Image: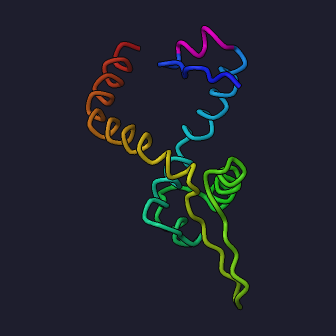
Amino acid sequence: MDEQKAPSNLGDVCRNDETAAVHVRDILDRVGDKWSMFVVSMLEDGPQRYGHLARDIPGISQRMLTVTLQRLERDGLVERTSYPEIPPRVEYALSPLGESLRGPIDALAQWAYSHQEEFTSSRNRYDAKR
């Protein structure tokens, strides 16, 4: 099988391969939503129980956490382990694929953190014009 060189940026994907663009958009929708990013970040330190995640992710509802964990598990980013104990115990951990996402999420979070004042100023200027 011929290996194709990966495109160097998202624009190249969109311009050159419509099928790949659809798949990339789907993946970016999943990993780019705010709850997925928070869950992946919270799992960086190792397996966590549901209750711990619910306490440590500000603003997430129980339903949204459940849906997010299920989607991340379906996509292969999170692994769910059930322990046959009484009461039952379930832990969530990053899969190897999820671990590979840590760097990009951390870089994006650092970028967002260091540019938050610029965003606020820009939004205020824009809103003042309206």
Q: Relative to residue 101, is residue 4 depicted above or below?
A: above
Using the image as rendered, state which of residue 36 and residue 59 is in the foreground: 36
Q: Relative to residue 92, is residue 16 depicted above or below?
A: above
- Quick one: which residue is furthest to the front in this view? 1
Q: As drawn, is 95 to the left or to the right of 107?
A: right
Q: Which residue sits at x=60%, y=8%?
A: 15
Please state the horizontal and vertical placement of residue 115, each as a whole percent of the image. 28, 32
Q: As drawn, is 42 to the left or to the right of 98?
A: left
Residue 67 sits in quarter = bottom right
- Quick one: which residue is furthest to the bottom in this view? 86
Residues rendered magenta in the picture = 11-17
Q: Which residue sits at x=59%, y=16%?
A: 13
Please state the horizontal and vertical placement of residue 124, each as a whole percent of the image. 32, 25
Q: Relative to residue 92, is residue 9 depicted above or below?
A: above
Please state the horizontal and vertical placement of residue 111, each as a whole percent of the image. 32, 35
The N terminus is located in which quarter?
top right
Q: Which residue sits at x=50%, y=45%?
A: 101
Using the image as rendered, state which of residue 96 and residue 121 is in the foreground: 96
89 part of magenta stretch: no
Using the image as rendered, state which of residue 31 and residue 52 is in the foreground: 31
13 part of magenta stretch: yes
Residue 130 sits in quarter = top left
Q: Which residue sits at x=31%, y=40%?
A: 113
Please state the horizontal and vertical placement of residue 54, each as a whole percent of the image. 55, 65
